[in-house]
Image: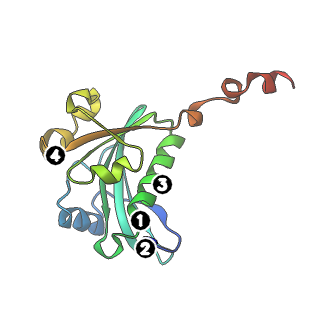
Amino acid sequence: MSQKPRYRGRLVLRAIAPDDAGFIKALAEAKLLTSGLSGSSCANFAFVNKAGEPVGYAGYTVFDKIALLRSCVVLPRHRGLRVGGRLTAALISQLQGMGVARVYLLTEGAEFFFATLGFAALGRDQAPGPIAQTEQFVRHCSDEAVFMMRPLDEMMHMKLDDIHPVARKAK
């Protein structure tokens, strides 16, 4: 049984400006939205190797306890090496640390990939108001785009007393 190839090496998220030339170029080449990337609730990242070279880009927009994952692209020479899963997991981990409860996205063609990462398809009519008003939702993605959601690990949002109240009271 052959193993799927995987990117070997450390990858880290690096915050980037919404007008980063490499980011904009990668999004344009992948035919992804290159506007609506800035604002106080938006964050954009390059996923870089130890030499500081980007292997992918992504961003999210946070609306209180929910977030819209957007602008996810792996550079062509790194596709098929499981970089997209690592990038998505890094963003989800960051969002969990911020107290986000649910992450949404729209995809045209990558629904199977996102389903393997715990996202489930929803009807577009189930989009929360702030998500439904984004440029990505309203203008960019066609009606064929699949709307997906992933709840984040509830354990990340619980206090120790919620998990094991006896342990805290025994002290």
* Mark 1: secondary structure: loop
Query: CA–CA distance between discs 4 and 3?
Result: 24 Å
The label number, if any, that marks residue 91 in the structure image? none
Task: Check whether the beta carbons of the residues at disc 1 and disc 2 lie within 8 A of each other.
Answer: yes
Query: CA–CA distance between discs 3 and 2?
Result: 20 Å
Q: Nearer the viewer, residue 40 or 98?
A: 98
- Looking at the image, residue 46 sits to the left or right of residue 33; the answer is right
Where is mark 4, residue-wise? 141
Q: How far from the left and from the top, in percent, is residue 132?
A: 22, 33
Where is mark 3, residue-wise? 90
Q: How far from the left and from the top, in percent, is residue 15?
A: 42, 58
Q: How dense is the environment of label 4, judged by Cα within 10 Å: few (below 14), some, or many (20 and up)?
A: some
Q: Nearer the viewer, mark 3 or mark 2?
A: 2
* Mark 2: secondary structure: loop
Which sits earlier in the primary sequence, circle 1 or circle 4? 1
Residue at screen point 23% across, 32% down: 123
- Looking at the image, residue 92 sits to the left or right of residue 132; the answer is right
The label number, if any, that marks residue 5 in the structure image? 2
Q: How far from the left and from the top, in percent, is residue 110?
A: 27, 54
Residue at screen point 35% across, 62% down: 57
Q: Nearer the viewer, mark 3 or mark 1?
A: 1
Q: Is residue 102 above or below residue 9?
A: above
